Image (cartoon, grey):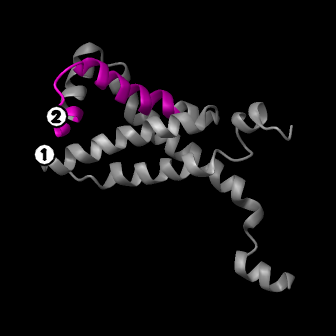
Amino acid sequence: MKTVKLIANFGFSEYKNFGLFLIRVCIGIVLILHGYPKMFGGTMEWAGLGATGMSSIGVDFFLPFWGFMAAFSEFVGGICLVIGIFSRPAALLIFFTMVFAALFHITSGKGSPASAIQLGVIVSALFISGPGKFSLDHILFSKSF
């Protein structure tokens, strides 16, 4: 029976937490690098980002706020994923940002929505699965500790 289980899992089931760690850290780094110029671009950058992202759904108010929230979710959310703290809330914020990014690309015809969709799927999987054992979330908030 053990042989069947080993073949079915290819012997990697004990590495699930390392896989979550690797995905979390790599995607977090990508998001930090992508969000850094937006986060520190200032009010004009946020207004432009907000106008770009929200135009796909017809929203034309509080544009600097929406732009700041997108920059915040990418940059600070990326840091949270790398560290493994507040991973689920960060993943949720990033997911919504990626939804609006994909909508922008689809409705405007500018660029491809593929990257936004891929990142959205990855962070939604992290939201569902959680950050794994190699995270501050697990250390600080796990009941088994």
Please rate how many residues cluster around mark 2, counting C-alpha atoms within 10 Å: few if below 14, some from 14 to 19, many from 20: some
Q: Secondary structure at mark 1?
A: helix
For the record, the magenta segment spans 53-78
Give the residue type at disc 2. Ser
Q: Residue at x 33, y 26 (%)?
A: 38
Look at label 1 and name its amino acid: Ser
Residue drawn where x is 74% and y is 82% of the image: 7
Q: Is residue 75 magenta?
A: yes
Look at the numbered disc 2 and give the secondary structure of its residue. Answer: helix
Nearer to me, 20 or 90: 90
Q: Are marks 2 and 1 in contact (CB under 8 Å)?
A: yes
Q: Residue furthest top?
A: 43
How many neighbours does mark 1 have within 10 angstroms: few (below 14), some (14-19), or many (20 or more)?
few
Camera sees residue 70:
yes
Most prominent secondary structure in the magenta stretch? helix
Q: Residue at x 85, y 41 (%)?
A: 144
Where is residue 77? Give x, y as percent: 50, 32
Whether residue 110 is visible here, answered yes or no, is no
Compared to residue 3, the image places residue 59 above or below, namely above
In this figure, which residue is indicated by the disc labeled 1? 108
First of labels 2, 1 by sequence position: 2
Provide the residue designation for mark 2.
Answer: 55
Real-space CA distance between mark 2 and mark 1, rounded to the nearest whole angstrom: 9 Å
